[in-house]
Image: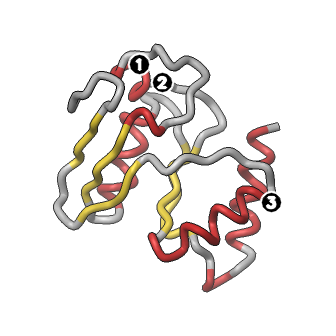
Amino acid sequence: EMQRRCQEVIDACTAMGEDNPIESIHDVGAGGLSNAVPEIVHDCDRGARLELRNVISADKSLSPMALWCNEAQERYIIAVSQSRIEEFKKICKRERCLYAIIGHATEKQELVLTDAQFDSRP
């Protein structure tokens, strides 16, 4: 069901043609976020600052490593310009699709992870 909802959001955005709010998209597969996030950031010639505890997870006790490497299905990393976030949120709400803003891109090509639960930079 969640896969279908994700696809509805993607379809709604791509149907907007040149006005598509999605700048880049990457599915989360083997390696979890630890693979997908660096790939999308690198492909966009950017860095990123991310908060691991913003990642949606049913198990709040996951260690930073488990959260970063979790291979949960039906997830995408989607890059949306800050100026289009509210528009993207509305599409997700309309399609009843969960989303999380886990961080933001930076000009400096460096990936910085933080974990508020453990007050650390894993």
- The residue drawn where x is 38% and y is 51% is 103
From the viewer's perspective, is residue 44 above or below residue 51? below
The amino acid pointed to by label 3 is Arg
x 71%, y 79%: residue: 16
Badge 2: how crowded within 10 Å, few (<14), some, or many (20+)? Answer: some
In the rendering, at what x and y percent does residue 99 appear? 61, 47
Which sits in the foreground, 69 or 43? 69
Q: Pointer 3: residues within 10 angstroms few (<14), some, or many (20+)?
A: few
Quarter of the view holding residue 65: top left
Residue assigned mark 2? 70
Q: Which residue is mark 3?
A: 94
User: Relative to 72, does residue 77 appear above or below in the rendering?
Assistant: below
The percent coordinates of residue 70 (x first, y second) are 48, 24
Tell me, yes or no, whether the two marked residues, 2 and 1, touch with CB atoms within 8 Å: yes
The alpha-carbon separation of the residues under discs 3 and 2 comes to 27 Å
| Distance from Cα at disc 3 to Cα at disc 1 | 31 Å
User: Position of 98 compared to 107: left or right?
Assistant: right
Front residue of 19/39: it is 19
Q: Amino acid at mark 2?
A: Asn
Amino acid marked by disc 1 = Ala
Disc 3 secondary structure class: helix
| Residue 32 location (% of width, % of height) | 46, 31
Q: Is residue 21 left or right of residue 3?
A: left
